[in-house]
Image (cartoon, rainbow, N blue to C red):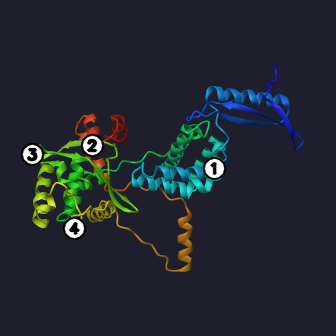
Amino acid sequence: MKTDSRLKKRSEKNGKDVWTAILPLPRGADGIRRQRRFSFIGNKKDAEKALIAELAAIGNGSFVAPDRTTLGQYLADWLIASKSTFAGKTWERFEGIARVHVIPKLGDVTLQRLSASQLSKAYAQWRGSGLSGQTVIHHHRLLHRVLAQALREGRVRQNVAAIADKPKAARREMRFLTTEEIERVFTAAAGTRFSPLIAIALATGARRGELLGMKWDDVDLQRGTVAIRRSLEQTKRGVFEKTPKSGKARVIALTAGAIDTLRRLRLSEADTRGIGGVAGSAYVFAADDGSAWAPHRVTDGFREVARRAGVVPQPQRQRASTRAGRKASAEVGAAPRAKLPAQITFHSLRHTCATMLLSQGVHPKIVQEMLGHSTVSITMDLYSHS
């Protein structure tokens, strides 16, 4: 095999030959010619093999110019550039994962030297530190998304997150309320703002944010429908509107009971706040002053209702009264905790709605569209118990 005339021996380093070559690269988007300085330390035969591999990569478009950017640097830049792309809460979750976990563990690794085995090891270590399987899956999804962007930009040869050992999470139990528990919850919520909210949550299966983002313009009492067009989300900067999780609006048919609940709520709101309180742009489920009802306040308030109803246990505080007692308590606390059954939360109302509909023989496709799932298989996978 004839030696490529571009390959030249230039010097020595640590007793080994240094070979270099100037290789042409395809023109850039600006039409300007580009070059790549190839460098190899070793014997001539190995240098020729490396040069052939480099030329093949340039020819088939898989060539990636050397880059010393670290994962931490690239991730920080990615977060800044993507801030307007994601919903506020989603971006805050990405930023928290990057700052607290990814950058401290992998931030110093050069982006191009990051390997699938390093990611697999990091997943295992995060899991071993006490993070849940689902949380580590969120870490994986962020890294996969970021490295996919680096691949599209030609910064790396492959997305190593796609071939790493993907973390797994135990299947989460779908906790729903029984008929008797529903009656107790309504009894506990009677006379409060939670009573109509709970009723519509059970009737529609809408998510918490979707219910709080519902406006009177979205409600058609004549046709008996409600449109889910937006959702409220809680961020560090406050409460904001966003599109539903599926990215598109959907219309849900209301039961006679739900229509009656909304009609009575509208009359009550008009009585309390005047006609402006039920104007088209007013929230159906609002705070005391008519403004957006903060999602976290709904979560906390529903928990109190559920405790009064006896479907959520009261919080228990244990305090050791002696040094020996504190020591014993610490030793007990160090032991592995038994997995507790899933508790009733506001989101359980959505699970309850879906479970009741499927148990009554409603077609899964109808339930899927009502819940806003992207496919019917997601619905059936989540509610296979029905």
Q: Which residue in the protein does label 3 denote?
A: 222
* Real-space Cα separation, disc 2 to disc 4, in angstroms: 27 Å
Residue 352: % across, % down: 28, 48
Q: Which residue in the protein does label 1 denote?
A: 70
Q: Which mark is residue 289?
A: 4
Residue type at numbered disc 3 = Gln
- Within-10-Å neighbours for mark 4: few <14, some 14–19, many 20+: few
Which secondary structure, mark 1? Answer: loop
Q: Which mark is residue 249?
A: 2
Camera-nearest residue between 202 and 293: 293
Q: Is residue 144 left or right of residue 91?
A: right
Which secondary structure, mark 4? Answer: loop
User: Pointer 1 and pointer 4: residues touching (CB < 8 Å)?
Assistant: no
The quadrant in which residue 332 appears is: bottom right
Name which of mark 2 and mark 1 comes first in the sequence: 1
Name which of mark 1 and mark 4 comes first in the sequence: 1
Residue type at numbered disc 2 = Ala
Which secondary structure, mark 3? Answer: loop
Residue type at numbered disc 1 = Thr
Q: Is residue 270 above or below residue 33?
A: below
* Residue at the (62%, 54%) spot, across then down: 105
Is residue 135 visible to us here?
no
Residue 70: % across, % down: 63, 50
Is residue 335 visible to us here?
yes
Residue type at numbered disc 4 = Asp
Camera-nearest residue between 337 and 77: 77
* Real-space Cα separation, disc 1 to disc 4, in angstroms: 49 Å
